[in-house]
């Protein structure tokens, strides 16, 4: 059911519709190197295949999961002999630096036109030298209308499905379980058809009772990606190292990107642990750096150590709440004036305007603290950071109470 021409593609009108940049590139025959960035099942591989069908260039594909530097160099050598070629690399975010570097020269010289597909932000996952030689196109999630259109097309065109009498009576569970992934949606429809003899009436109850029980059968590429990472993070947040390790194992066995797992733990270390245990962020950051050096299979040990530590640590989201509160206040109040006492005063004119006047240098005072107001007058006295209920932040609260008095007197 994969489309082979633009007229069959559903969604991504901003790129392939009339006047869309990829449509125009295909029409001109001048295809730039590009990174297609978007969630699973929205058409990244399909667009690459359509480009291959529309332009008269040799087309090569690699999966970053299994390909190495040698595979990349072999294709570059073929391109040098046969003329300019298009190289499609699926999951390009899984290529390490040396693999990405192997592409640089050929992309820069135009020996190959690179089309990379990724579900991860290319700013983080593609090195800057390669990224600067590519256009980045963001693919949008498919709408409910797009997804239902795909199902209706499949029921009319698929050789097996069109032989069956299949009616979509209810669609919410179908859409919810597929999660906007067209490939997953079509697999789910096929699964439903295979599970019912005779006429198939798709209802929410049928989808829940049949599809969810067998959902892992047809998914070999981690369709539960978001569910499992959510369960992993919530298990750590809930201080359950056993559940955390279990969901970590699920991700490892499913081939989840090691950097994705480690990056989420770095975020959690600040969001959910914070100053209840500042060492958590240090350990998570070191774990992220370590797995980038080590890779699978040994990095599973590093991930496990970090996950167990984070799950077993005291928890606090006080810093997370503080920045949310502060940002909301900024949105509500706009650009409030910085108090004159703490403004920068590098020139005589600024000093004459009282910039810096009245500033108390903290280190000239007892306990390295001077009692003065640092917030704009309109919001003076506001407390954004409220230390959490844990031993480490209890120390911070006592220290702040000693300095600021009533602001932290509870």
Image (tube, rainbow, N blue to C red):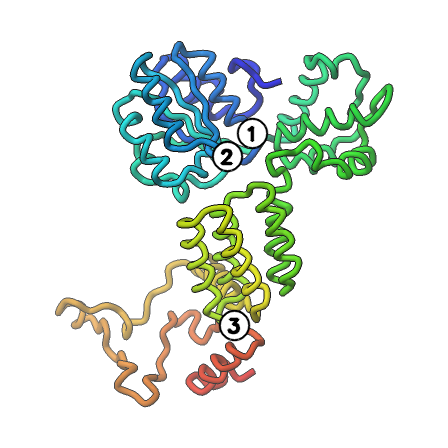
CA separation, marks 2 and 1?
7 Å
Q: Position of residue 408 (x, y in %)?
A: 50, 81
Q: Is residue 203 left or right of residue 400?
A: right
- The quadrant in which residue 169 appears is top right
Give the vertical position of 139 relative to 237 (above or below).
Answer: above
Provide the secondary structure element on which disc 3 rests. helix
Q: Is residue 183 left or right of residue 168?
A: left
Q: How many marks?
A: 3
CA separation, marks 3 and 1?
41 Å
Q: Decide which of tag 3 and tag 1 comes sooner along the chain.
A: 1
CA separation, marks 2 and 3?
36 Å
In this view, the residue in front, 154 or 243, is 243
Q: Circles 3 and 1: CB distance less than 8 Å?
A: no
Q: Circles 2 and 1: CB distance less than 8 Å?
A: yes
Q: Is residue 346 left or right of residue 235?
A: left
Provide the secondary structure element on which disc 2 rests. loop
Provide the secondary structure element on which disc 1 rests. loop
Q: Is residue 28 left or right of residue 157?
A: left
Q: Name the residue located 55 percent from the left edge and 19 percent from the top edge.
A: 9
Q: Name the residue located 82 percent from the left edge and 33 percent from the top edge.
A: 206
In this view, the residue farthest toward the top is: 56
Question: Which residue, given by chain and number where applicable, does mark 1 sit on?
Answer: 42
Give the vertical position of 49 relative to 34 (above or below).
Answer: above
Question: Which residue, given by chain and number where applicable, does mark 3 sit on?
Answer: 276
- The quadrant in which residue 41 appears is top right
Q: Decide which of tag 2 and tag 3 comes sooner along the chain.
A: 2
Query: Would residue 384 be seen by someone viewing this image from the given angle?
Result: no
Give the vertical position of 249 relative to 200 (above or below).
Answer: below
Question: Which residue, given by chain and number where applicable, does mark 2 sit on?
Answer: 38
């Amino acid at each position: 059911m994969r489309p082979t021409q633009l007229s069959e593609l559903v969604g991504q009108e901003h790129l392939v519709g009339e006047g869309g940049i990829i449509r125009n590139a295909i029409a001109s025959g001048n295809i730039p190197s590009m990174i297609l960035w978007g969630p699973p099942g929205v058409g990244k591989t399909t667009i690459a295949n359509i480009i291959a069908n529309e332009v008269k260039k040799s087309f090569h594909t690699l999966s970053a999961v299994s390909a190495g530097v040698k595979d990349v160099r072999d294709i570059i050598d073929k391109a040098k002999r046969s003329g300019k070629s298009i190289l499609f690399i699926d999951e390009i975010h899984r290529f390490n630096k040396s693999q990405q570097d192997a592409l640089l020269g050929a992309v820069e010289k135009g020996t190959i036109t690179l089309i990379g597909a990724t579900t991860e932000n290319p700013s983080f996952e593609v090195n800057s030298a390669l990224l600067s030689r590519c256009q980045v196109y963001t693919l949008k999630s498919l709408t409910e209308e797009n997804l239902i259109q795909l199902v209706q097309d499949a029921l009319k065109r698929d050789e097996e499905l069109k032989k069956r009498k299949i009616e979509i009576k209810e669609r919410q569970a179908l859409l919810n379980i597929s999660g906007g992934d067209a490939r997953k949606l079509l697999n789910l429809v096929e699964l439903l058809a295979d599970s019912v003899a005779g006429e198939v009436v798709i209802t929410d109850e049928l989808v829940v009772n049949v599809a969810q029980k067998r959902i892992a059968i047809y998914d070999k590429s981690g369709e539960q990606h978001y569910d499992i990472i959510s369960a992993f993070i919530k298990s750590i947040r809930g201080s359950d190292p056993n559940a955390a390790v279990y969901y970590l194992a699920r991700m490892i066995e499913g081939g989840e990107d090691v950097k994705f797992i480690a990056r989420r733990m770095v975020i959690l270390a600040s969001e959910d642990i914070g100053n209840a245990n500042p060492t958590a962020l240090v350990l998570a950051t070191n774990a992220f750096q370590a797995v980038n050096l080590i890779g699978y299979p040994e990095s599973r040990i590093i991930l496990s150590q970090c996950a167990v530590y984070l799950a077993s640590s005291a928890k606090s989201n006080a810093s997370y709440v503080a920045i949310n509160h502060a940002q909301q206040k900024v949105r509500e109040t706009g650009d409030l004036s910085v108090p004159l006492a703490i403004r920068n005063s590098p020139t005589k004119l600024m000093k004459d305007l009282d910039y810096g006047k009245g500033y108390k240098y903290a280190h000239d005072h007892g306990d390295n603290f001077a009692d003065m107001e640092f917030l704009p007058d309109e919001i003076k006295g506001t407390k954004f950071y409220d230390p959490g209920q844990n031993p480490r932040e209890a120390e911070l609260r006592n220290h702040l109470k000693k300095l600021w008095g009533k602001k932290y007197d509870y």
